[in-house]
């Protein structure tokens, strides 16, 4: 015997004592045994997957951990990209000043990238000056790794650049 949602559960609900298999309606403590038998079967079916909460928690927890790791990795990729572009723009601005050279822009770009995301990202830096219309433009180009797992990834995949108009002191 046990107590269920509606009252008293019988060990073998609704069967007679001789074991003939014939259903017998008993009234004990105001509870109909046939109704209890139906409730008992429904309770067993509803509880058939009990105990799977631990497995479900582990699977959902690991799935959420992967989603969180992916989100953090995307944030890191965006951070590295923006940092390298900003460093290239700063280097181009430095190289475009009248009293500075392309080597100064390359040095500044390399220092900024090394301090921000690491020396591995400052390996391939080129500084060129080109004419666009009536203005000279300094372009700092950085070929850098794409961070796939943390900061590790394939080398020189991204080609990021920054540009600046060369300062002209002779112009009025």
Image (cartoon, rainbow, N blue to C red):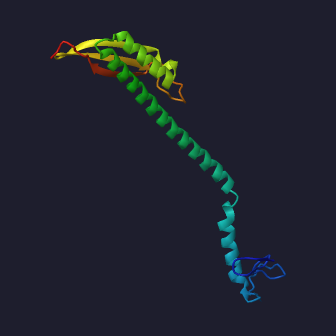
Q: Is residue 130 left or right of residue 16?
A: left
Residue found at the very far right of the displayed protein: 18
Q: Is residue 148 above or below residue 111?
A: below
The C terminus appears in which quarter of the rendering? top left
Viewer-proximal residue, 162 or 54? 162
Q: Is residue 152 above or below residue 136?
A: below
Rendering quarter of residue 171: top left
Question: Residue 67 appears at what percent x and percent y?
Answer: 53, 43
Question: Residue 134 appears at what percent x and percent y?
Answer: 16, 16
Q: Is residue 4 left or right of residue 77?
A: right
Rendering quarter of residue 83: top left
Q: Residue at x 51, y 35 (%)?
A: 73
Q: Residue at x 60, y 50 (%)?
A: 60
Question: Residue 86 appears at what percent x and percent y?
Answer: 38, 26
The N terminus appears in which quarter of the rendering? bottom right
Question: Residue 87 appears at what percent x and percent y?
Answer: 40, 23
Q: Is residue 36 left or right of residue 11?
A: left
Q: Is residue 35 above or below residue 84?
A: below
Rendering quarter of residue 149: top right
Q: Is residue 134 left or right of residue 99?
A: left
* Residue 111 visible, this angle: yes
Q: Residue at x 33, y 15 (%)?
A: 95
The mark total stands at 0
* Residue 160 visible, this angle: no
């Amino acid at each position: 015997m046990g107590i269920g949602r509606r009252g008293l559960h019988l060990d073998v609900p609704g069967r007679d004592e001789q074991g003939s298999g014939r259903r017998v309606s008993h009234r004990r403590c105001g509870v109909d045994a046939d109704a209890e038998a139906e409730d008992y079967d429904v309770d067993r079916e509803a509880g058939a997957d009990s105990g799977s909460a631990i497995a479900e928690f582990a699977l959902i927890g690991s799935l959420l951990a992967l989603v969180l790791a992916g989100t953090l990795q995307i944030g890191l990729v965006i951070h590295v990209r923006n940092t390298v572009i900003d460093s290239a723009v700063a280097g181009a601005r430095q190289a475009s000043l009248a009293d500075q050279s392309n080597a100064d822009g390359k040095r500044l770009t390399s220092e900024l990238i090394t301090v921000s995301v690491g020396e591995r990202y400052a390996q391939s830096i080129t500084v060129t000056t080109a004419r666009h219309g009536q203005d000279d433009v300094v372009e700092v180009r950085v070929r850098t790794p794409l961070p796939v797992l943390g900061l590790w990834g394939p080398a020189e995949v991204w080609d990021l650049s920054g540009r600046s108009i060369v300062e002209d002191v002779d112009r009025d």
